[in-house]
């Protein structure tokens, strides 16, 4: 992957490759009331899912757990994150743990990520960035709309992708951590999601519609009786820029602890790194 593209254009394949350590060494992420009625009464799945983001906004905030799996060239890696998200202000904080390297070493420092409208901030990114500085990425310039670049999908962007639901079926009822949920399976169209998303997510989702190998995103989602997303698994596909090989990414989001206080403060301009990002250093900071 061309790391110069990460530094200047935020090309999604290279960005994910650096964050996950998939460089040269690894070639061989209407209101909830109506939604709740649909969930309880078994209404139209497509209409229910298109309103899932509204139910999260009504909930205000939650804790979040993330998992992102990438498979390419016979290699599979997984990175995990945990944090909180404010759906009304669209601000979140995640601590992202990188996977062990090929030798099994796990000395990577966790990356702190701040999610904000139109921006992704990363600390402990490595690649020559001072440990006390943040890197800021304009998500509208990313060809994946920050659905996979950060190694974790923005929770509200993931929910807004469901606004593009084209077809869906109710796969059954189950429980997650003791909470009754309904399991839906379907596909969403990134282009449609971009058209109906909130202002802050329109440009990133439109970029993803153009940048992925396909604009159709298969998903499995579990909603509670309030229509809120409890678990969401989305599968993306893009083309490795260097090897022209298809790369499959599965992003899983778990939401719980609704109403949790969220205090996210974005970095001051003086704390944002504007220098050169090394092309020959991993982004792990380890």
Image (cartoon, rainbow, N blue to C red):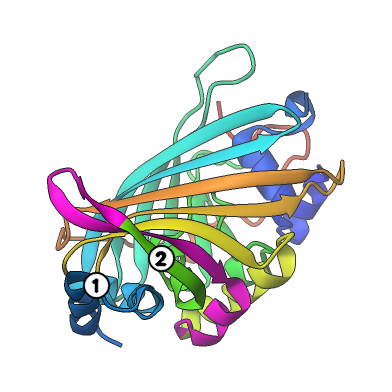
Which quadrant of the rendered structure holds the N terminus? top right
Q: Residue 60, position in %: x, y? A: 21, 71
Image-quadrant location for residue 130: top right
* The stretch drawn in magenta includes residue 195: yes
Using residue 192 as the reference point, say whether residue 63 is left or right of it. left
Give the camera-side residue of 160 and 202. Answer: 160
Image-quadrant location for residue 227: bottom left
Give the camera-side residue of 204 and 230. Answer: 230
Residue 264 seen from this side = yes
- At mark 1, the secondary structure is loop
- Mark 2 is surrounded, within 10 Å at the Cα level, by few (under 14), some (14 to 19) or many (20 or more) other residues, namely some
Q: Residue 229, position in %: x, y? A: 30, 62
Which stretch appears magenta? 172-198
Which residue is pictured at 58% across the width and 30% down the height?
Answer: 77
Which residue is pictured at 50% across the width and 42% down the height?
Answer: 68
- Mark 1 is surrounded, within 10 Å at the Cα level, by few (under 14), some (14 to 19) or many (20 or more) other residues, namely few
Asked whether the beta carbons under mark 2 and mark 1 sit within 8 Å of each other, the answer is no
């Amino acid at each position: 992957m061309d790391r110069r593209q990460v530094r200047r254009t935020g090309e999604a394949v290279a960005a994910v490759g650096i964050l996950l350590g998939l460089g040269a060494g690894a070639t061989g992420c209407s209101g909830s009331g109506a939604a709740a009625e649909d969930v309880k009464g078994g209404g139209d799945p497509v209409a229910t899912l298109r309103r899932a983001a509204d139910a999260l906004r009504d909930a205000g905030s939650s804790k979040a757990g993330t998992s992102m799996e990438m498979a390419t060239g016979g290699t599979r890696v997984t990175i995990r994150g945990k944090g909180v998200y404010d759906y009304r202000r669209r601000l979140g904080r995640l601590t992202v743990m990188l996977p062990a390297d090929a030798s099994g070493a796990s000395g990577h420092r966790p990356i702190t990520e701040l999610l904000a409208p139109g921006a992704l901030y990363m600390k402990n990114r490595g690649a020559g960035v001072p440990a006390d500085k943040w890197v800021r990425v304009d998500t509208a310039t990313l060809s994946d709309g920050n659905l996979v670049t950060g190694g974790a999908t923005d929770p509200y962007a993931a929910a807004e992708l469901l606004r593009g639901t084209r077809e869906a079926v109710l796969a059954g009822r189950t429980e997650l951590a003791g909470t009754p949920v309904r399991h839906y399976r379907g596909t969403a169209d990134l282009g449609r999601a971009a058209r109906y998303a909130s202002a802050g997510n329109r440009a990133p989702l439109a970029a993803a519609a153009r940048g992925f190998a396909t604009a159709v995103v298969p998903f499995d989602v579990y909603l509670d009786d309030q229509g809120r997303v409890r678990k969401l698994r989305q599968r993306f596909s893009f083309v490795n820029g260097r090897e022209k090989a298809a790369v499959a990414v599965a992003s899983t989001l778990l939401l719980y602890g609704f109403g949790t206080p969220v205090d996210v403060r974005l970095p001051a301009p003086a704390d944002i790194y504007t220098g050169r990002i090394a092309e020959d250093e991993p982004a792990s900071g380890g």
